[in-house]
Structures are given as structure tokens and as C-alpha cells.
Amino acid sequence: MSERAVLEVIALDAEDAVAAQAGGADRLELVTDMAADGLTPSVETFTAIRAAVDIRLRVMLRATDGFAAGSPEDVTALVRAAKALRAAGADEFVLGFLDEQGGPDLAAVESVVAALDGCRWTFHRAIDRAADRDALRKQLADLPGLDTYLTAGSADGVDAGLDVLLAEAARAASGEPGYEQRILVGGGLRLDHVPGLRAAGVSAFHIGGASRPAGWEGAVSADAVRVWREALDG
């Protein structure tokens, strides 16, 4: 029996969180402002969600739309936000920044990671915009706490990135350095992608819009999440 797959659902507020947990989510990604693809939520939002559910929470650390860290002041503000969230009890995070050449912005990433005190974190879909995915993985490999890459395999989504995801899953299975982190597949993910990804050894899946039948203006639906839970467990 293969290991139970992790299902991570985007939550904007406590209502989303309660519905996602009821539907069988294992973990939530907490963000605000999906018009900008998800920015750092407030400490108040985090504490409300933490009080409402008892599953794992990964909190987004991102100040601006796009994959640049922003100005030095933006990075300082993110470090401050990370410390405030840590003080409020947050212990898992999501981040990722690229420089103008499409490589990892190591200075920004390292500054923010230093504020996390070794907490576990996901490098998000910035990897799908990287100039060289393999080089990025090897450059980030030794950062403390990095245990996951959220990726569609392509900036254009899972349909376009499927071959990349399957190849990276194979490299992970072979124990290749730089591929120890879990692959969390998200970004245009559909239910029909799941069987092939599971067969390749992928064990973590991330949904946003797929959990919201009414779109981003509406809340997470426990029933929609349950469909995914059953597909992953099937």
C-alpha cells in the first residue's frame, strides 16, 4: 500500500479552513489576496484559523505579486512578518524568490529563512519560472527547514509540466542530491492527473480553485475537498 497522499488546500479565512478540514485536507496553505496569487496573511487571520482547526498550517511569506522579493525594505518587512507569525505560533511556511536572471534570490531567501528558526517550509511555484530548475534545487538543497517544492512542472500548469514532474519524481526516487524534498503538485491540477502522478510516486497535492465551486469569490466547499480526498485515497 502506498503512503497516504497529503492534500493541501488554500485557505483565506477560518470558514475556508473548517470546510477544508471537514473535507479531509491534511494541511492548509494560508494566504491573502489571490488576485496577486497569494500574499502573507495577517497575524490575526493566522490566529483565527489556528483556533478553528487542528490540522497543519503553512503560511505564505510574500509581499508582492510576482516572484521577486522586492526592495530591501520589502525583505525586511517579510522578516518582521515571519517573526510575528512565529511568535503567534506559526511553525510551517511557504516562500520563494527569484533574481532578475531567473536564479534563486539567495540573499532574500536566506534572510527570511533565518527568521524561521529551522521551521519547515515549502519553496513555491517560483521554481516553475526558474531559468534552471535543477540548478535552483542544488543551490537551495542545504537550507534549513526546506522540505517541499510546490510545482506544476511548468509556468503553464500541470498539463504542460507533466513530463517534468514525472522526471523529477524519478530523480527523487533514485536519491539524487537536490531532490530529497517532497514534490507537492499544484497549479492547474485536475483529478485526471492524479493516477499517473501517484503511480510515479508523487505523494502530495495542492488545490486552490478546485476546492471552490463558486470561484475565488466563494468559500471552500467541504464536498469539493472530499472528492479530492477520495481520489487520492482511491
Image (cartoon, grey):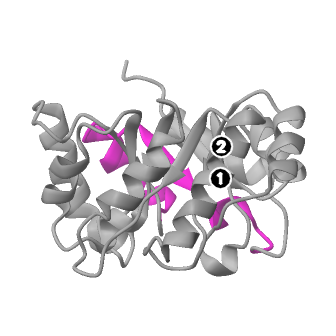
Name the secondary structure under disc 1. Answer: helix
Left or right of 201 in this view: 26 = right
Q: Note whether 93 is above or below 26 in the view shown.
A: below
Name the secondary structure under disc 2. Answer: helix
Residue plotted at (84% across, 62% down): 219
Residue range highlighted in magenta: 189-215
Left or right of 102 in this view: 177 = left
Q: Position of residue 28 (x, y in %)?
A: 66, 44
Q: Specify whether residue 205 is painted magenta.
A: yes
Left or right of 21 in this view: 15 = right
Q: Position of residue 47 (x, y in %)?
A: 85, 41
Amino acid carrying label 1: it is Arg
Residue occupied by mark 2: 83
Q: Position of residue 22 (x, y in %)?
A: 81, 37
Q: Note whether 147 is above or below 66 in the view shown.
A: above
Residue plotted at (75% across, 74% down): 215
Label 2: how many Cα within 10 Å (few below 14, some 14–19, many 20+): some
Amino acid carrying label 2: it is Lys
Residue plotted at (25% across, 75% down): 102
Q: Specify whether residue 171 is painted magenta.
A: no
Left or right of 87 in this view: 163 = left
Residue plotted at (74% across, 64% down): 212
Foreground pick, 97 / 13: 97
Does the CB distance between marks 1 and 2 fall below 8 Å? Answer: yes
Classify the position of the N terminus by image quarter: top left
Instruction: Kindly identify which numbered label has been placed on residue 80.
Output: 1
Q: Position of residue 134 (x, y in %)?
A: 14, 56
